[in-house]
């Protein structure tokens, strides 16, 4: 299984959808709350060029937003 990281905020509806999807599929993930963690927010913007959340990293690939078909493809589900 590829490493999965999600940069999110507590109030982001699509972040919750993505995390619920990962839990439903048994996909382990690391979560960073970029609303309160300034360093991780800077890291997210530097790596992805995105200010919006969620930013999901699967292996070496970035997914911006909850793009379920792309996530399924990258995870091989």
Image (tube, rainbow, N blue to C red):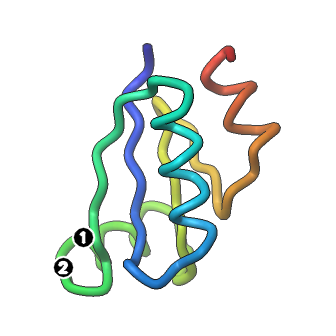
State the residue at coordinates (55%, 26%).
25
Q: Which residue is mark 1?
A: 40
Label 1 sits on a secondary structure element that is: helix
Screen quadrant of the N terminus: top left
Q: Which residue is mark 2?
A: 37
Q: Is residue 8 above or below residue 21?
A: below
| Badge count | 2
Query: Residue 37 versus residue 62: which sits nearer the camera?
Result: 37
Confirm or deny contact between disc 1 and disc 2 (CB under 8 A).
yes
Quadrant of residue 40 within the rendered picture:
bottom left
Query: Residue 30 versus residue 41: which sits nearer the camera?
Result: 30
State the residue at coordinates (51%, 37%).
22
State the residue at coordinates (42%, 69%).
8
Label 2 sits on a secondary structure element that is: loop
Screen quadrant of the C terminus: top right
Residue furthest toward the right?
A: 69
- Across and down, in percent, residue 45 comes to 43, 75
Q: CA distance from mark 1 to mark 2?
A: 5 Å
Crowd around label 2: few <14 · some 14–19 · many ≥20 (10 Å): few
- Across and down, in percent, residue 67 comes to 75, 51
State the residue at coordinates (48%, 45%).
57
Q: Is residue 4 above or below residue 43?
A: above
- Across and down, in percent, residue 2 comes to 44, 21
């Amino acid at each position: 299984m590829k490493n999965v990281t999600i940069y999110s905020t507590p109030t982001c509806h699509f972040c919750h959808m993505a995390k619920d999807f990962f839990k439903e599929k048994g996909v382990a993930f690391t979560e960073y709350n970029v609303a309160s963690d300034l360093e991780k927010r800077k890291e997210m913007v530097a790596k992805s060029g995105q200010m919006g959340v969620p930013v999901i990293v699967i292996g070496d690939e970035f997914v911006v937003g909850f793009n379920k078909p792309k996530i399924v493809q990258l995870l091989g589900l």
